[in-house]
Image (cartoon, rainbow, N blue to C red):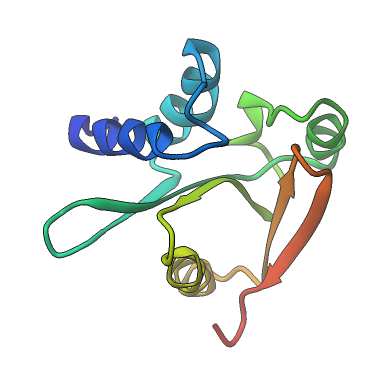
Amino acid sequence: MMYAHDYHDALELLKRSDHHKDWGKEEITRCIEEPLGIRQYKIIRDADMIPLVLATWGFPTDKQVDNYVESGNFPIKGYKGDGKDVWIVDFIAEKGYTRMGFLVLKKMFMRSGYRKAFWYRPESGKLGWHLVRGA
């Protein structure tokens, strides 16, 4: 189930992101509608309910990760994949809110029992992870 106000806020953050603003229907379906539909996302808003941060994540298998790194496109089946690790797929933050957004995510993942959260930036080829314990 996807909440209309969350979808609207996700699209607003996409429009304000240099990396995401030119996304078309295929990217929005694969990278926004899919994780929102299965509740694998977090939107952080300010006191006036203005969206500041959007994060989506999945649980890809090792093979899906290899395909992701090779193609630069997170596989739609990776959101509900059988992988044991959480992967941050998209992270959009308004200027000045990146650190706070990651701290909120790390605490949320820690409470869910995860030790690490992985990420990949296709535009730079940078692959990394965040320790979640002690967040």
Left or right: residue 26 versus residue 39 is right
Nearest the camera: 128 or 57?
A: 128
Q: Position of residue 106 (x, y in %)?
A: 53, 71
Which image quarter: residue 74? top right
For the question of whether residue 123 can be seen, the reply is yes
Q: In what quadrant of the picture does the N terminus appear?
A: top left
Nearest the camera: 33 or 120?
A: 120
Nearest the camera: 37 or 99?
A: 99
Q: Position of residue 12 (x, y in %)?
A: 31, 35
Residue plotted at (78% across, 33% down): 68
Above or below 7: residue 94: below
Left or right: residue 33 versus residue 75 is left
Query: Which residue in the rendered view is the most extreme toward the bottom?
Result: 134
Query: Which residue in the rendered view is the most extreme toward the left?
Result: 48
Above or below 113: residue 92: above
Residue plotted at (37% across, 40% down): 13
Q: In what quadrant of the picture does the C terminus appear?
A: bottom right
Which image quarter: residue 7? top left
For the question of whether residue 84 can be seen, the reply is no
Residue plotted at (54% across, 13% down): 26
Left or right: residue 49 versus residue 115 is left
Q: Position of residue 36 (x, y in %)?
A: 39, 35
Left or right: residue 124 versus residue 117 is right
Report the label total.
0
Q: Position of residue 110 (x, y in %)?
A: 53, 74
